[in-house]
Image (cartoon, rainbow, N blue to C red):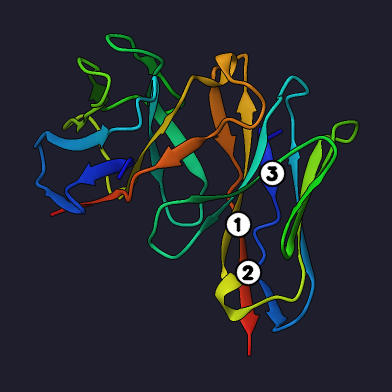
Amino acid sequence: DGGITQSPKYLFRKEGQNVTLSCEQNLNHDAMYWYRQDPGQGLRLIYYSQIVNDFQKGDIAEGYSVSREKKESFPLTVTSAQKNPTAFYLCASSIAPPARQGAGETQYFGPGTRLLVL
Amino acid sequence: RKEVEQDPGPFNVPEGATVAFNCTYSNSASQSFFWYRQDCRKEPKLLMSVYSSGNEDGRFTAQLNRASQYISLLIRDSKLSDSATYLCVVNWPTGNQFYFGTGTSLTVIP
């Protein structure tokens, strides 16, 4: 089955600790995205990647880092610099980035990771 | 002005009712529009794309008004299983990303 997987489902972070969230897709999609969702708020873009070895900051990139060494994988690291990391983190992918998409092409989401601070 | 705005609700409607949600967007260059459904503590899932001519999928109808920069979702004959949050999503070609509304909460009551 094709899809996007994220792990772990729940993650606990201690003060001063870096943690890495995994995102893998086997849809052969070029573009991948990381979003953060807080209660009562919409999804906010952290980072996105249009292609392997390329990534761009989204609206709230401070305190986060990413890599895109393989097409299938786009891990997100929440660093100790992120002072309010508790949130629901969602990874998504699309065939192409919005600027190169045909009308109607959209993105698909993984099941998400809930990050909690101890 | 926010990139995408939705009425957060909540909308509480009886089974069988018809309910409509609107969403406005600020970028006139946007080309693709979508409605997603998000259940509590789950990921968003694509409900339907929104095309210029309007489109229908069973009990759901989506429409786009480019002149006024809004999209709408109409749900007819509401079912209990329609209870969820509905997210409006717009692509942002100049910024090469998507923008999401905060979502509209729907509860269908028996």
Label 3 or label 1, whichever comes before in sequence order: 3
The image position of residue B43, as x and y in percent, is 41, 52
Crowding at mark 1 (Cα within 10 Å: few <14, some 14-19, many 20+): many
Mark 2: secondary structure? strand
Whole-angstrom CA distance, mark 2 to mark 1, is 8 Å
In the rendered structure, which amino acid carries the disc numbered 1?
Tyr
In the rendered structure, which amino acid carries the disc numbered 3?
Glu
Residue on which the image places disc 2: B106
CB atoms of marks 3 and 2 within 8 Å: no
Residue at the image point whose x is 71% and y is 25% from the top: B31
Front label number (3 vs 2): 2
Mark 1: secondary structure? strand
The image position of residue A22, as x and y in percent, is 19, 36
CB atoms of marks 2 and 1 within 8 Å: yes
Crowding at mark 3 (Cα within 10 Å: few <14, some 14-19, many 20+): many
Residue on which the image places disc 3: B5
Where, by quadrant of the figure, is residue B64 drawn? top right
Say above or below: B44 vs B66. below
In this view, the residue in front, B50 or B21, is: B50
Write down the chain letter for disc 3.
B
Mark 3: secondary structure? strand
Residue on which the image places disc 1: B86
Whole-angstrom CA distance, mark 3 to mark 1, is 12 Å
Q: Residue furthest front?
A: A1
Write down the chain letter for disc 1.
B
Residue at the image point whose x is 44% and y is 40% from the top: A108
Residue at the image point whose x is 67% and y is 26% from the top: A103
